[in-house]
Image (cartoon, rainbow, N blue to C red):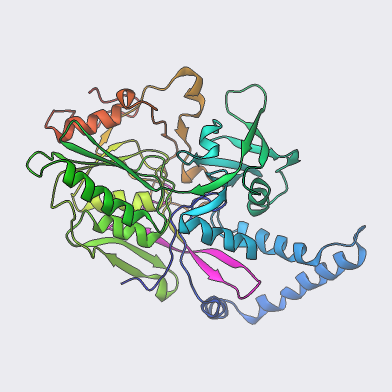
Amino acid sequence: MCRISHVLVGAALGAGLTVLAIQPPTALVRAAKAATGNDTYSRLNLFGDVFERIRASYVETPDDGRLIEASISGMLSSLDPHSRYMNEKAWRDMQETTSGEFGGLGMEVTMEDGLVKVVAPMDDTPAAKAGIMSGDLISAVDGTEVQGLTLEQAVKKMKGPINTKTRLKIMRKGAEQPIEISVAREVIRVRPVRYHTRGGDIGYIRITSFNEQTTDGLRKAIADISKQIPPEKLAGYVVDLRNNPGGLLDQAVSVSSAFMARGEVVSTRGRATEETQRFTARTGDLTRGKPLVVLINGGSASAAEIVAGALHDHKRATLIGTRSFGKGSVQTIIPLGPGKGALALTTARYFTPSGRSIQARGITPDLEVLQEVPDALKSRADSKGEASMRGHLAADGAEQTGSQAYVPPEEKDDKALGAAFNLLRGVTVKADVPSPKKAIPN
C-alpha cells in the first residue's frame, strides 16, 4: 500500500502539472550522499565564492535570501520542467490548493519560455468567467512584466485580498495585440466532481481535478445517479476527464478503485528503492460492473492519465476522444524544515498496469473523435503536450506531440460525448481507429 501521504499528478494555480509525494528531508540527503562523491561537494566552494563576490561587489546591496532562492530554483529548473523549489509561502499555497479551497483567480498554470502559461481555467471561477483560455500566455500582472519572475513570484502577484482586482496582459495565439483582462479575486472552492443523468439511462460524471475532495465527490455522484436511475435502466456511466490537469495520486488510485473490483492501478519506478511501488484497487467497484466510457483529450494529464490508463488496461472502460497530454513522471514533495519551504523533485516515472510509460507519449483512445472547432479558436484548439516542454524526460519510444484539447461549451455540439452516449446505448459508432485527421461520425 501507499506510504506516501500526498502525491500530485497536476494541480491548481501555481503548481503546474506535477506528481507530488511527501518525503522526509533526510531521505534526500541520504540519496545525494550515496550518488555523489566528495569532489562534487568540494565544487560547492565555487558557489560560495560567487555568492560572496556578488554580496561584496554588486552595484546595489543584494537580498541574500532572494539570491539563494534564485540559485536553488535555477538548479532545479535545469533538471526538468516539473522539478522546482517552493519557499515557505509557496509551500503553504500548495497545501491550500490540494485541500480544494484557496484564494485567487482559479486556473492551472505552468511556466513556458519565461511566461506564465494557462493550462486550463477551472470551471465557475473568476478566470473562466473573464474569458481566460487554455494556452493563453500571461506576460504582465498589474503592469509588472512576468519575464524574469519565477512561477511562484508570478502567482503571488496574481493572488491578493478577496474582491480586489488584478490586471493581466495576455498573449493569445491568433490575436494581433496583447489582450488586457481585469479579474476580481475570489475564494476558490474547487468542486472537482459534477454530474447529471442523461436520457434516463446514462450517468455523466465530470472530474475536473484530483484534490482531497474528489473521491468523496465521486462516491456521492455514483450514489445519487443510482437513486435517480433504476439498475435495470442504467446503461452505464460516462466519466469525463478532458482538460483535467491532475492532482493527488492517492485520489487517482481511489477514483480508479471506485470502478474496479481488484487489480493494479499504477506503479512507480525510480532510482531509489523506496520510489518503486505498486498501488492496487482497494474499495471495490461501486458501479457494480456497469459499462463505462472515459473521455480524454490533449488536456488530460497526470492523475487523469493514471485513471484512464488503469481502467483501459483492465478493459474496464472504453476511451474516447484524443490522445492525452503525456505527463508520466512523479515529483516527490520534500519539506526542508520550518521556514525553509519544500522541493518538488522528480523521483520516478509511473506506469500503467500493463507496464506502459506514457511519458511524452500520452494515451491513445480506443475511438478518436475530433471536435469541430470554431474558426476563432482553431489556433489554440491543440495542446502541445509533455513532449513539447523544454527539458522534459525522454520517452521510452517515439514521442508524440500535439493533440486536440477543445471541448464544445454545448453538449449538443460535443461529438466525443455524443459518441460515448451512442456506444453505451449500443449504437455502432465505429469499430476501427480513424486516421488522425478524420473525426468519427456519430
Position of the C terminus by quadrant? top left
Which residues are drawn in magenta? 331-360
In the image, residue 239 sits, relative to residue 30, either above or below, namely: above
Tell me if I can see residue 431 in this picture: no
In the image, residue 336 sits, relative to residue 348, either above or below, namely: below
For residue 423, side relative to residue 273 (left or right): left
Position of the N terminus by quadrant? bottom left
Residue 226 pos. (x, y %): 17, 46
Front residue (pair 132, 229) = 229
Residue at screen point 38% across, 53% down: 303
Snapshot quadrant of residue 338 = bottom right
Snapshot quadrant of residue 300 = top left
Front residue (pair 238, 358) = 238
Residue 369 pos. (x, y %): 30, 30
Magenta span includes 345: yes
Residue at screen point 90% across, 60% down: 58
Residue 283 pos. (x, y %): 22, 63
